[in-house]
């Protein structure tokens, strides 16, 4: 059975002036594993328009075709359903803009099990190396993209509120798709247990805190879950919550960096600072965060303010700069615990990631049984991996476990 049919191919090229389709084909986008929650393919379409022939190269994301366990797992988690609703409904009301105002790739076709986007690699964008943290310019470009994305939630809500002559919130219509599925708890528990086990083997602070560790770390993860719901204190937005290096593309044009964000399968409706804290803990070092957090918060606020101002909206009624640092600090529990689950996966060599996640049997074990032994073994073999993981884990200990010991 073909992944796309002739009618769907014609609907993809129709906005170009309904050119004649000469041929089309689908191939793997890369021979490397570039994502965990779907297959990634390249769609090539040969077209003819007004006597000129050309080839379109597009990006396709679809449900796993050859890994039955992963496909069923994603259906259970409703992640594809989430993204489908966002792309086919809510985000159609958002303005992705063009040029430097753009924050995500252009969607060309959407189906419940398959999405077709422009291939941003053809536009000069590149995915950063997952083995390295982001540089200053990349972080600031990513902050801009996230701020523009968040601003669209505010703009949409303000517009709907005006239309309906009452206070409107996205949660009213999309709550079913903007909450964490209960089935995701097992994956989080497996990640949490791996943190505890890794610290017991490698932490510079062992063994004095082991008993406290097994109490405080689960409390932290429970606290993070509480933050993954609409805030009663801060104005909420649709948050991406998975902004690690594979989900951010960068274009460097003469030293000017621009970022696009992709993959909206794990979106939530919550405080916008969840995205900022998790993105920073995913992609930067502890010293970087300490040195630049004030500058990052200013840049985020100024970008949101600019986006709202262009729509005639005053940011002060939505997001107060005086509260931003407090909101960020409160979100760190989410950022650091989310990173503690994801960074040990991010920091792996490509070959090791494929070994663990491309094999259906191993993939099931890593996701829903245990990944502790694998992470501990990689930490023993790969010093760069270990340095990145233990810096994050020990920061968690120093921030949250030690204060409990002192009490």
Image (spheres, grey):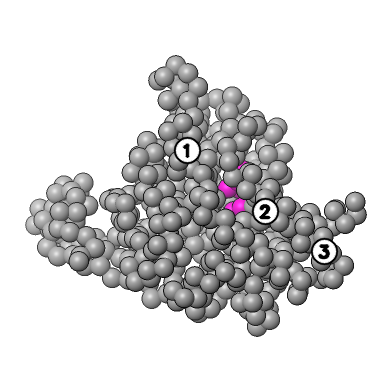
Q: What stretch is highlighted in magenta?
A: 272-280
| Residue 38 seen by the camera | no
> In which quadrant of the rendered view does residue 349 lie?
bottom right
Residue name at image x 33 percent, y 67 percent: 65
Q: Position of residue 156 (x, y in %)?
A: 44, 31
Q: Is residue 170 visible?
A: yes
**Residue 75 spot, x, y in % from top left:** 40, 57
Closer to the camera, 93 or 285?
93
Of labels 3 and 2, earlier in sequence is 3
Q: Name the residue under label 2.
A: 221
Magenta highlight: main SS: helix
Query: What residue is disc 3 on?
Result: 211
Crowding around mark 1 (Cα neighbors within 10 Å: few <14, some 14 to 19, many 20+) is some
Q: Is residue 33 left or right of residue 317?
A: left
Residue 147 location, quadrant: top right
- Is 371 displayed left or right of 98 in the figure? right
Q: Does the magenta stretch include residue 279?
A: yes
Q: Residues within 10 Å of mark 2 (few under 14, many from 20)?
A: many
Provide the secondary structure element on which disc 3 rests: helix
- Where disc 1 sits, the SS reads helix
Q: Are marks 3 and 2 in contact (CB under 8 Å)?
A: no
Residue corresponding to mark 1: 175
Crowdedness of circle 3 by 10 Å Cα count: few (<14), some, many (20+)?
A: few
Q: Which of marks 3 and 2 is in front?
A: 3
Of pointers 1 and 2, the one earlier in the residue sequence: 1
């Amino acid at each position: 059975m073909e992944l796309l049919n002739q009618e769907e191919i014609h609907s993809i090229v129709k906005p170009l002036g309904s050119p004649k389709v000469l041929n089309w084909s689908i191939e793997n986008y890369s021979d490397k594993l570039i994502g965990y929650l779907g297959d990634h393919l390249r769609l090539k379409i040969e077209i003819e328009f007004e006597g000129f022939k050309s080839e379109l190269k597009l990006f396709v994301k679809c449900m796993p075709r050859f890994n039955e366990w992963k496909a069923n797992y994603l259906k259970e988690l409703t992640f594809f359903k989430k993204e489908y609703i966002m792309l086919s409904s809510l985000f159609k009301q958002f303005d992705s803009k063009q040029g430097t105002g753009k924050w995500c790739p252009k969607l060309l076709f959407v189906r419940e099990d398959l999405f077709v986007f422009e291939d941003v690699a053809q536009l000069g964008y590149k995915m950063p190396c997952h083995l390295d943290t982001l540089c200053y310019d990349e972080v600031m470009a990513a902050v801009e993209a996230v701020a523009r994305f968040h601003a669209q939630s505010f703009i949409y809500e303000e517009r709907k509120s005006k239309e309906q002559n009452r206070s409107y919130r996205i949660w009213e219509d999309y709550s079913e798709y903007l909450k964490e599925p209960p089935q995701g708890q097992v994956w989080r528990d497996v990640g949490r247990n791996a943190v505890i086990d890794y610290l017991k083997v490698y932490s510079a602070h062992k063994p004095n805190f082991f008993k406290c560790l097994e109490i405080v770390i689960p409390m932290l993860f429970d606290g993070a879950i509480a933050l993954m719901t609409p805030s009663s204190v801060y104005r909420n937005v649709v948050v991406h919550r998975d902004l690690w290096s594979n989900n951010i593309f960068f274009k460097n044009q003469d030293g000017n960096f621009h970022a696009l964000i992709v993959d909206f399968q794990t979106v939530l409706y919550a405080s916008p600072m969840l995205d900022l804290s998790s993105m920073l803990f995913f992609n930067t070092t502890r010293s970087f965060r300490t040195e630049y957090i004030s500058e990052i918060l200013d840049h985020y606020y100024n970008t949101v303010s600019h986006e709202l101002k262009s729509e005639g909206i005053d940011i002060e009624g939505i997001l107060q700069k005086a509260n931003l640092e407090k909101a960020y600090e409160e979100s760190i529990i989410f950022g650091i615990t989310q990173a503690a689950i994801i960074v040990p996966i991010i920091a792996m060599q490509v070959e090791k990631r494929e070994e663990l996640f491309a094999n259906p049997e191993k993939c099931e074990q890593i996701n829903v049984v245990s990944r502790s032994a694998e992470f501990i073994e990689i930490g023993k073999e790969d010093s760069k991996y270990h340095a990145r993981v233990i810096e994050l884990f020990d920061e968690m200990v120093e921030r949250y476990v030690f204060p409990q010991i002192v009490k």
